[in-house]
């Protein structure tokens, strides 16, 4: 199948061809037709299979038929992280380069004024993180009464990060007569049940097994006590072919510590996590993308917002707290039909989680093995000769989504009057928003 057979706008097809794509990926071929038909869609596919294009291409085709009114927003894409929001905006601009459409992005960590100006001007497509959108909406900025399409990208991640109360507030303020799309690499049954709140008779489009890592990623699990992790990482980075590497840490402080120790070993590395400013995160990502730095150390907040070509390896320095994050972490490599390799360090504490991961993906995974060429005895001697690095603490596991439930329980109700009237902002009197019964599109 070719993109020309999917019914996309000619200008969109031209832009796709200029990006070097001729054939759609399976999720694109399966999702684009029902999205073009205007119905609600749930799209599930492995990371790195082109889900962003699966919804942006048909949305751009739909938006090409009109133009946003001054101050209004026609399509809204919600994303869990700043990195993913920026990546979506970049893709939308690339695919819509031959269309007279306006695009804006809204996220936290930067000044509000340019974003407020963009909302006042209006745009055909807005990409936003829920927190900043609520902040600006509560100030009366943004007119969503003419909204045609809502997209929840990485929907499971947004709910797992505790965004459900924010998403509900946003959805209540949107028109009832709209198209709602949900896309993710994983979507648990618990979360699927929530789609009845946001969608109306959605069509499920699923490519591959749920929660299954991409087949293009070769997975390895290496035995490694806590105090040998840094030495093993340095050993691996000295191997040929480790040209572009993402290392995942469980904590922000752990990511910084890994960077400092790598630099002592002569390996330049940069970190991305929530404590870094947006400018710092952007500079780090650009240095990694350009190849000036070959090692990027990240926490899970960035695992779904990094879309860089040519990543050769992913290293799970710490086993993830949420097993679903394993799929997203290793999905940073082996993208767009390329091959890649993931390496996960396994301590004795991680063995039970490894068995749970095997049940999650539904097939056997390689047994932990000793790292080839790594002298464990000598590394142990050196580790005991120097202060041992602090190990990232593992919280007691209380079932999938427990972090999200705790955050929801702590979430405070909105202050009375936080959403005020007028044309701008959410919850304007006389608008089309409002609570809808379960099973209806909201």
Image (cartoon, rainbow, N blue to C red):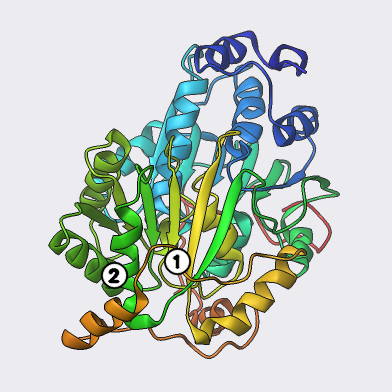
- Left or right of 428? Residue 392 is left
Q: Nearer the viewer, mark 2 or mark 1?
A: 1
Q: Label 2, secondary structure: give it.
A: helix
The front one of 88 and 268 is 268
Q: Mark 1 points at which residue?
A: 371
Numbered disc 1: secondary structure: loop
Q: Mark 2 points at which residue?
A: 231
Closer to us: 54 or 103: 54
Marker disc for residue 72: none
Q: In which quarter of the image is residue 14?
A: top right
Q: Position of residue 188 (x, y in %)?
A: 73, 65
Comes first in the chain, label 2 or label 1: 2
Residue located farthest toward the bottom when viewing the structure as drawn: 396
Cα distance between the residues tagged 2 and 1:
11 Å
Q: Please tell me which residue lies in front, 138 or 236.
A: 236
Specify whether residue 135 is in view: no
The percent coordinates of residue 48 (x first, y second) are 58, 42
| Residue at screen point 63% across, 39% down | 49
Left or right: 290, with 156 as reference point = left
| Quadrant in which the N terminus is drawn | top right
Dot 2, crowdedness within 10 Å: few (<14), some or many (≥20)? many
Name the spot of residue 357 as percent of width and height, x first.
66, 71
What residue sits 54% from the left and 80% below the top? Answer: 403
Residue 302, relative to residue 366: is it above or below?
above
Percent x, y of residue 183:
66, 47
């Amino acid at each position: 199948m070719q993109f020309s057979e999917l019914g996309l706008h000619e200008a969109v097809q031209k832009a796709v061809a200029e990006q070097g794509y001729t054939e759609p990926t399976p999720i694109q071929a399966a999702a684009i037709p029902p999205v073009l038909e205007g119905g609600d869609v749930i799209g599930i596919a492995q990371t790195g299979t082109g889900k962003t294009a699966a919804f942006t291409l048909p949305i751009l085709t739909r938006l090409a038929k009109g133009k946003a009114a001054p101050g209004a927003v026609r399509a809204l894409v919600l994303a869990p992280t700043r990195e993913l929001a920026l990546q979506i905006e970049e893709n939308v601009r690339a695919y819509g380069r031959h269309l007279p459409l306006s695009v804006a992005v809204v996220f936290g960590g930067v000044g509000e004024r340019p974003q407020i100006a963009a909302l006042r001007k209006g745009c055909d497509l807005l990409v936003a993180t829920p927190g900043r959108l609520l902040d600006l909406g509560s100030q009366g900025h943004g007119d969503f009464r003419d909204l045609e399409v809502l997209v929840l990208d990485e929907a499971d991640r947004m709910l797992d990060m505790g965004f459900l109360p924010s998403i509900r507030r946003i959805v209540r303020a949107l028109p009832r007569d709209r198209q709602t799309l949900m896309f993710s690499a994983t979507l648990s049954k618990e979360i699927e049940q929530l789609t009845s709140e946001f969608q109306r008779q959605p069509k499920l489009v699923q490519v591959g097994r749920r929660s299954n890592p991409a087949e293009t990623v070769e997975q390895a699990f290496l035995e490694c006590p806590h105090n040998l992790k840094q030495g093993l990482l340095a050993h691996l980075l000295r191997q040929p072919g480790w040209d572009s590497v993402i290392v995942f840490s469980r904590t922000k402080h752990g990511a910084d510590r890994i960077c400092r120790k790598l630099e002592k070993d002569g390996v330049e590395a940069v970190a991305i996590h929530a404590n870094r400013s947006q400018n710092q995160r952007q500079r780090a990502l650009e240095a990694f993308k350009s190849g000036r730095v070959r090692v990027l150390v990240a926490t899970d907040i960035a695992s779904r917002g990094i879309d860089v070509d040519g990543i050769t390896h992913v290293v799970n320095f710490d086993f993830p707290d949420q097993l679903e994050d394993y799929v997203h972490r290793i999905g940073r490599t082996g993208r767009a039909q390329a091959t890649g390799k993931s390496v996960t360090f396994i301590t004795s504490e991680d063995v039970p989680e490894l068995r749970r991961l095997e049940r999650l993906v539904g097939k056997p995974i390689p047994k932990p093995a000793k790292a080839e060429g790594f002298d464990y005895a000598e590394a142990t001697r050196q580790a005991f000769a120097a202060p041992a690095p602090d190990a990232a603490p593992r919280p007691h596991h209380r079932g999938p989504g427990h972090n999200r439930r705790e955050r929801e329980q702590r979430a405070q109700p909105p202050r009375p009057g936080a959403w005020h009237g007028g044309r701008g902002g959410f919850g304007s009197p006389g608008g089309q928003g409002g609570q809808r019964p379960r099973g209806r599109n909201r």
